[in-house]
Amino acid sequence: MGEFSSSPPPSHDHDISNKYETPTPQVFTSFNALKDRIKSHYEVCSDYYYSLWGEHIHHGYFSSPTDTKEVAQIRLIELLLGRSALPAGSAVLDVGCGIGGTTRYLARNHECTVIGLTISGRQVELARNLTAKEAGVKCDQVDGAEFYEVGKGKARYVELDAEKMGDYFSNTSNKLTFDCVWISEAMSHLPNKELFFQNASKLLNVGGKLVVADWFKAEELSSAQMEADIRPIEDGMLLPPMCSQSEYVHYAAEAGLKVFSKPFDISKDVSKTW
């Protein structure tokens, strides 16, 4: 797979987690309330996640007992690149970009022009600071609407609810289309997944790719299994009702998309992340 590099997390004199209380899982009362909780969660917790996981706030794909989490996290990105056959130099919308780890990787290592999208203003701030540091410029030297030069690629960030991306990038002042809409472990947060697939289809160029990695429930679970296993995950991880892989395939087809690479299960390969 070659050599991988990752920006180190910031040093801390003490465990940053001690500054925060562990929230009690709560059942959401409405989808808008859930979105507010998700935004608040990442406003508060993103610095801690950076100290814990580094710049990539997603699972790692472990193929060797000696893999570090940093190597495994990069390998997951490379797995998605391989399965999608995404051409170098593509225009990419990275939805749920976190603090921009994948956004920068695609720019730096795949020469892509990438816009990272997140609902969290704090994540945008962290992403811009990290990207400016890598680009060798001061953060305030680059306007929020301008791209940072990252390797041979480019990256910038937008604070936006992902369910509004179709309208946002269809607006005259922001009008853009993409070769790829990339969403890794973020769609499970979205209440209206059908809308997301419709928006992705609308924003993709002809021949463009929607690249998805996500959490799924198994097919045909019993009511008892749903209550015992799935509901606690949904409530604890700020998720609306989880979907199965076949539901995503259905939503994609309804939006006019075709399967390029069949869904596959990597749960055993990423379990070491926890």
Image: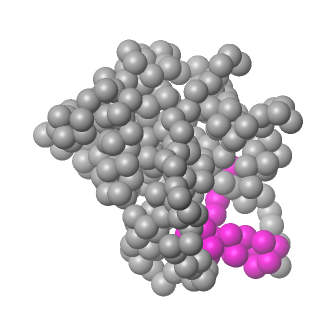
Q: Quadrant of the N terminus?
A: top right
Instruction: Tally the numbered discs.
Output: 0
The way the protein has been coloured in the rendering is: one colour
Q: Residue at x 49, y 29 (%)?
A: 105
Q: Residue at x 42, y 25 (%)?
A: 107
Image quarter of residue 230:
bottom right
Provide residue 115's location: percent of width, then percent of height.
Answer: 35, 36
On the question of residue 110 being in view, the answer is: yes
Q: Quadrant of the C terminus?
A: bottom right
Looking at the image, the residue that sits furthest to the right is 65
Q: Which residues are magenta?
A: 225-252
Q: Is residue 229 magenta?
A: yes
Is 217 displayed left or right of 73 in the figure?
right
Provide residue 121's location: percent of width, then percent of height.
Answer: 32, 57
Q: Is residue 26 above or below residue 41?
A: below
Q: Is residue 21 above or below residue 171?
A: below
Q: Nearer the viewer, residue 189 or 60?
A: 60
On the question of residue 190 being in view, the answer is: no
Q: Residue at x 54, y 39 (%)?
A: 8
Provide residue 71's location: percent of width, then percent of height.
Answer: 68, 32
Q: Is residue 154 magenta?
A: no
What's the magenta bit mostly, secondary-structure-wise? helix
Provide residue 237's location: percent of width, then percent of height.
Answer: 60, 68
Image quarter of residue 249:
top right
Q: Residue at x 47, y 58 (%)?
A: 46
